[in-house]
Amino acid sequence: MTENEIDVAWSKSVAGLAADALLTAGLIVKGDLDRVHKIIEEEVYVRLAARDRPDRTNWRYQSNQDTTD
């Protein structure tokens, strides 16, 4: 897969989870699920396409297991 294909697939996956969470929380109705999914998918993809990604060297993104006392 190309990097773009990976970004598209990941955007769809995240959008599905987010839209389902909004539906479960009662913030959207089932009839709006597909539209909301597409909007979220597009927004996530735009961020990825703009290279707006977490800074993996930033301490906020490390797991607790990666830190030492």
Image (cartoon, rainbow, N blue to C red):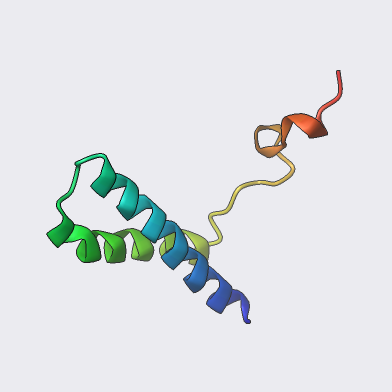
- Write the residue at 79% across / 32% down: 65
- Write the residue at 42% across / 67% down: 12
Position of 17 with respect to 58 (left or right) is left
Q: Number of labelled discs?
A: 0
Position of 61 with respect to 7 (left or right) is right
Point out the residue furthest to the top here.
Answer: 69
Residue 4 image point, x, y percent: 55, 76
Point out the residue furthest to the bottom here.
Answer: 1
- Write the residue at 53% across / 69% down: 7
In this orientation, which residue lies closer to the viewer: 54 or 19?
19
Residue 17 image point, x, y percent: 40, 54
Q: In which quarter of the image is residue 44?
A: bottom left
Q: In this view, does 45 lie above or below 17?
A: below
**In which quadrant will I find the N terminus?**
bottom right
Residue 34 image point, x, y percent: 23, 66
**In which quadrant will I find the C terminus?**
top right
Point out the residue furthest to the right here.
Answer: 68
In this orientation, which residue lies closer to the viewer: 48 or 50?
48
Residue 19 image point, x, y percent: 31, 54
Q: Quadrant of residue 59?
A: top right
- Write the residue at 22% across / 60% down: 33
